[in-house]
Image: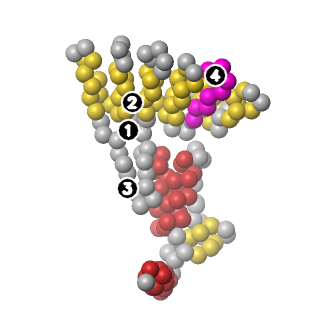
Amino acid sequence: MKSLKVIFCVVISIFFFPGISSAHQNGKVCSLDAAYSAGVKDANRDKDKRDDYSEPCEALLNKKYRQGYHDASNHSDTHHDGSHDQPKKQCLDHFGEKVCGYDCKKNVTNVMCAPKPNQQCIKGSFDEIACGFSCVKSGMSIKCATKHKYTCVAGSFDEIKCGKNCRKSFGHIECDEYDLGS
């Protein structure tokens, strides 16, 4: 029965929306789902947004691609259907001071919250807290990236570096571009 529904939807979409049906144009799949997924993948891989993703396809696909890119770059948990598990803003009290934000962490001497819902906070071994993107803990060190396009990688001896396309290479961490603010 499920396969009949799929066939029916494909036939209807081809008949009523010939430009929107799933077709291949120059190696790209021209469908709303493919365009949205490509936008999410590009944003998650820190690629530049492509305004011409579906050049041979219709303008509607470009709109869906932009929506996927926007959703993934502005929200931490984007689902394929476009819905979000948006973190809730919270407030914690610390010695009479109210601290508000996202993914708040509290220790004996400090409270910190991420200022944006797509950021996170992490606690270190010595009462330190860091908030940002792609937070990493390695031994005694913690570090978070300052921009969504950056990731942090932990290496040997508590070494952590953040930046664009960071990777371990022969015992060291290399990045194409370093996050100077982390």
Q: Check contact, mark 1 vs mark 2: CB within 8 A.
A: yes
At label 3, the amino acid type is: Ser
Q: Is residue 17 above or below residue 175?
A: below
Provide the residue designation for mark 2.
114
Q: Which residues are magenta?
A: 151-159
Q: How many marks?
A: 4
SS state under label 1: loop
Query: Residue 159, which numbered label?
Result: 4
Q: Check contact, mark 4 vs mark 1: CB within 8 A.
A: no
Q: Position of residue 41 (x, y in %)?
A: 56, 53
Q: Position of residue 108 (x, y in %)?
A: 35, 14
Provide the residue designation for mark 1.
117
Q: Nearer the viewer, mark 4 or mark 1?
A: 4
146 in magenta:
no
**Lower position in the chain sequence, tag 2 or tag 4:** 2
Between 159 and 179, which is closer to the camera in this rendering?
Answer: 159
157 in magenta:
yes
Provide the residue designation for mark 3.
83
